[in-house]
Amino acid sequence: MLNRTRKLDWIGKFLFVLFIALFTSFLLITCYKAPVTGRSQLILISEEEANQMGVTAFQEVLSKEKVSNNAVYNEAVTRVAGRITGVSVTPRYNWDYKVFKDDKTINAFALPGGKIGVYSGIIPVAMNDAGLATVLGHEVAHVAAHHGAERISAGILAQLGAVALGVALSNRDPLVVNAIMQAYGIGVTVGGILPFSRTQESEADRIGLIYMAKAGYHPGEAIDFWNRMELATQNKPRPPEFLATHPGYGTRVSNLKKWLPEAMRYYESSDRATNLLISSAH
């Protein structure tokens, strides 16, 4: 009986500490707001910690991927990215852009601290500087909005919830506990993590659209780019949108059309950019 009382007392203290940690975390929401959208954010790690994680992850990618020596591609990425970062809210970052020699991968990525990777397979789909600005505007937006740190923070909260649930179920039948924990994992993923990821992706689309417009790239080109992306990846299997990390192409294009008038106001007050075609020569 004494051991049971001590166990319940320990569980009570643990849950109290967990409550305080979560309550404090939610108070931090008002301390961070995404650029352009003004969305309140929950970030539980420092910018320095997130940036160091980004540097470490980028070094790991560099150790595995082959960097392209295509001068045209590298110059195009550096040229367009320089204009995008020049109008973004990212003054403290040491930007580093790398083009990876992988024509089969139609993708790009961004890591905290200003580390951006562009696979060569996406550049022909971009077709011109404005198309490439769509890609790079989206990736710079992820960095500017601290999406990496925010995603890590969401993972921390999900883990804390799993621990708390495990403690609360400590006296239950192991089979019941296992079933409940599996249901929790599915619920968090489908009901929380995946929708949150799609929210970040849509937000990066909107912020990126504003950045490319400010930099002098016609934002209407973003719609053309995503239509080309859909054609370029039409043979690849796609999960239902509610099970995907990214919005579907139809959703993206619909959102971009909705945000286009806002972006055009920025474009009309900026210097015009010529949408130069990017050579595909290797």
Image: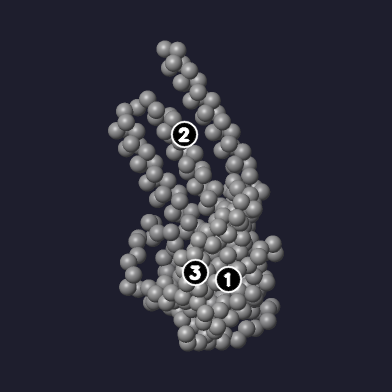
Q: Secondary structure at mark 3?
A: strand
Q: What is the CA distance from the residue labelled 3 to the residue labelled 1?
A: 11 Å
Q: Nearer the viewer, residue 109 or 233?
A: 109
Amino acid type of the residue tagged 1 in the rendering: Tyr
Badge 2: few (under 14), some or many (20 or more) residues near its Cα, within 10 Å? some
Residue 143 appears in view: yes
Tag 3 near tag 2, CB within 8 Å: no
Which residue has dot 1 on it? Answer: 97
Which of the two discs, 1 and 2, labels the residue nearer the N terminus? 1
Q: Secondary structure at mark 1?
A: strand
Q: Is residue 171 above or below residue 198?
A: above
Which of the two discs, 3 and 2, labels the residue nearer the N terminus? 3
Q: Nearer the viewer, residue 263 or 126?
A: 126
The residue at the point 52 percent across, 28 percent down is 14
Which residue has dot 3 on it? Answer: 108
Tag 3 near tag 1, CB within 8 Å: no
Amino acid type of the residue tagged 2 in the rendering: Ala
Q: What is the CA distance from the residue labelled 1 to the residue labelled 2?
A: 41 Å
Asked where in the image residue 125 lies, by quadrant, the reply is: bottom left
Q: What is the CA distance from the residue labelled 3 to the residue labelled 2?
A: 37 Å
Q: Secondary structure at mark 2?
A: helix
Which residue has dot 2 on it? Answer: 164
Residue 233 point in image, percent of width and height: 37, 73
Q: Residue furthest left?
A: 175
- Mark 1 or 2: the one toward you: 1
